Image: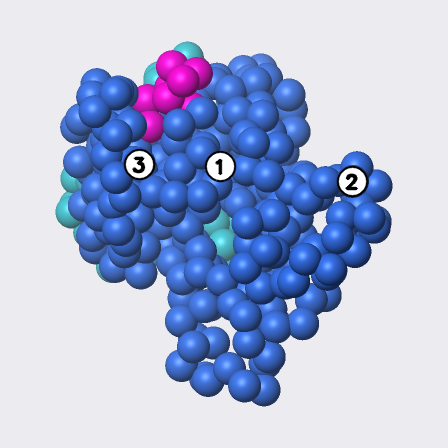
Amino acid sequence: MTSEVSVPPASVVLVSGGSRGLGLAIVSDLLAAGVKVAAFARTVTPELTALGEKYPDQLYYGSVDINDAAAGQAFVKKVETTLGPIDALVNNAAIGQDSLHVHTSADHLAEIIQTNLTSPLVLTRFVLRRMLAKGLKGRIVNITSICAQRGYPGLVAYSATKGGMDAATRSLARELGGRILANAIAPGFFASEMSAVLGPTQLDQIVRRTPTGQLTEPDDVLPIVRMLLLENTNINGQVLVVDGAASI
Amino acid sequence: MGEVMTAQGRSLPADDTVDLREIGFRSLDFSELALRVEDELGDELNFDAPGLRRIATVGDVLDFIEQLQSA
């Protein structure tokens, strides 16, 4: 057998859903670290545009609906000609849910599953095919959720999709034989998300029950993304929970 | 197949009966080869894992790719 060489740090990272929230924070953080980044989202925000102006040679971005596979593939090819071959993918794009299962229409269930599970898998397949065809090694980071491991009302379909991505992460790590490192990050609820649906009393209660005494912020997740994309750690097929131990 | 192995600093043995395990040619290497063939054909070559598991030698790889191309 040949000796295995470790997977090099990512040089061109594709981030889905990179126009706001955690996705935008990931894009900004990677650019600051000197990495070339390609980001797409349904809607390009002024914040993403501003990053494009700040890093004109380092960031390529555009408006793509992750459910439009053809547009996603065209975007990937454009990234390759602009920034170079993609050697890392951050699957971040997702839609949320705030409805009890019995009151969620079948069409909306299908939309959540398509956006949060099927489309990321299709994008991953395409990016992997490009990587393998070029003989590249690479890295995948799937942004999932603590919902994949713990039950929460109003998030049945969302949780199912995140659990599906966690499971896919493990199988990808096996299937890709160490040539591509595949990991997931499962953040707890972000303070911004929680405050949108919970009152101050409920928020205070959750904070008191979290051992670190604080809800998750995007900034808590960034060092983990950076580590999984850039460091030589031998972490593969894992789901790393970032929630201040709220779920244990 | 030779291109894939050369890119990894290895060489393709002349003997078709050589076991793939002996030369470190793994399933992902086969995937890389299939994707390169796809590029030439301009068409996707999709196949199930069981077909892949029957491949044991250099000759098997070449035969399998030939079958895929003619399918």
Q: How is the image coloured?
A: by chain
Q: Nearer the viewer, residue A17 or B8?
A: A17
- Tell me where residue A177 appears, x and y as whole percent: 56, 35
Q: Quadrant of residue A81?
A: top left
Q: Secondary structure at mark 3?
A: helix
Q: Residue at label 2? A: A213
Residue at left offset 59%, top offset 48%: A190
Q: Residue at label 3? A: A47
Chain corresponding to cyan in the figure: B
- In the displayed structure image, the side of residue A243 where residue A232 appears, left or right: left
Q: Is residue A180 above or below residue B31?
A: above
In the figure, the shade used to draw chain A is: blue
Q: Is residue B45 above or below residue A77?
A: below
- Tell me where residue A22 appears, x and y as whole percent: 48, 41
Q: Residue at label 1? A: A140
Asked if the magenta segment contains residue A33, the reply would be: yes
Dot 2 amino acid type: Gly
